[in-house]
Amino acid sequence: MTDRARAYRGAMASRGRALGVAALAAAFLALGTPTAAADHRDDPEVGYDVSYPQCGDDLPDDPAFAVVGVNGGLATRPNPCLPGQLEWAAEAATGQVPAQPEVQLYVNTANPGQVRHLVTTWPSRGLTPYGRCEGDNSRACSWRYGWERADVTVRYFFVPAAELAGVETDPGAYTWWLDVETMNTWQTGSSAARARNRAALEGMAARLSGTGAEVGVYSTGYQWRRIAGEVPEDSPLYDLDSWLAGSTTRTEARATCRRDPLVDGGRVVLTQYVTDGLDHDHSCV
């Protein structure tokens, strides 16, 4: 890690604490985010995904493509090792799978509207496709929450890290995946709660796609149904592509390519499988 990357890690850790969810931080330490470890000699068409759990680890040699987590497990927290991991991805990815961009990104997502009194990042105002946010637990404020989290992730986490890594700083040059998992904070208990969760994801997607970026969704079918439910055709999420988690072997990951996408109108373009604690990614296209 370069001196500049170490400086970024310290600065981003401080900023993440300022932007983070103070009262709930301890509850979010055990996260269901993609994990990876040291190099495995594998098929040259296999990709890997890495993030903050791999800080200080030896990363895989010669991935066909790489997906790097921009956040540190929470939508409000940066990955302190992002510059080094972006540099690894840009230098190590071989492009062996032409259909997959060599460097891709993923972001943590959430909607803490039901516990908004415990967080410092719930929006108090703002215009949205669902009307005006007034600080309440509404689809408007859920959308605004998602938009703001993506905005902070792009401007304060990703761009400075990309500058330090010496890689493309334009967020629109990348594919961004929304990491949707039950171990983050979501609204629960009703179809209205799932609609608010979808609104938060729509806000994030709007901010990212507004840069010109391609946006997709990462989850398992079970988690997606619990969090977002069925996505209606008029939702901006409707035609997003899927990256499906949950496989344990490449054979299973290949079969998972034939499953239904998380969102009707999209395709399954990536599947993830975990072997010896290392996240592998199989291209379905």
Image (tube, rainbow, N blue to C red):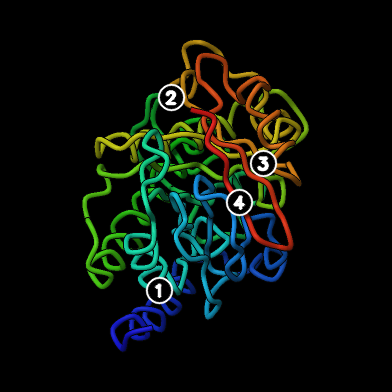
Q: Earlier in the sequence, mark 3 or mark 1?
A: 1
Q: Earlier in the sequence, mark 1 or mark 2?
A: 1
Name the residue tied to disc 3. 245
Q: Earlier in the sequence, mark 3 or mark 2?
A: 2
Name the residue tied to disc 1. 15
On-image quarter of the N terminus: bottom left
How packed mark 4 is, by other alpha carbons closer than 10 Å (few <14, some 14-19, many 20 or more), is many
- Callout 4 secondary element: strand
Q: Earlier in the sequence, mark 2 or mark 4?
A: 2
Give the amino acid at mark 2: Tyr
- In the image, 153: left or right of 282? left
- Callout 1 secondary element: helix
Measuring from the top left, give residue 26's x and y in whole percent: 69, 71
In three-dimensional space, the C-alpha distance between marks 4 and 3, rounded to whole angstroms, equals: 10 Å
Mark 1 or 4: in front is: 4
Name the residue at 53% across, 54% down: 48
In three-dimensional space, the C-alpha distance between marks 1 and 2, rounded to whole angstroms, equals: 30 Å
Name the residue tied to disc 2. 130
Give the amino acid at mark 4: His
Of the numbered discs in the image, which one, if any, rests on residue 280?
4
Give the amino acid at mark 1: Arg
In three-dimensional space, the C-alpha distance between marks 1 and 4, rounded to whole angstroms, equals: 31 Å
Give the amino acid at mark 3: Ala
Measuring from the top left, give residue 19's x and y in whole percent: 45, 66
In terms of image quadrants, where is residue 158?
bottom left
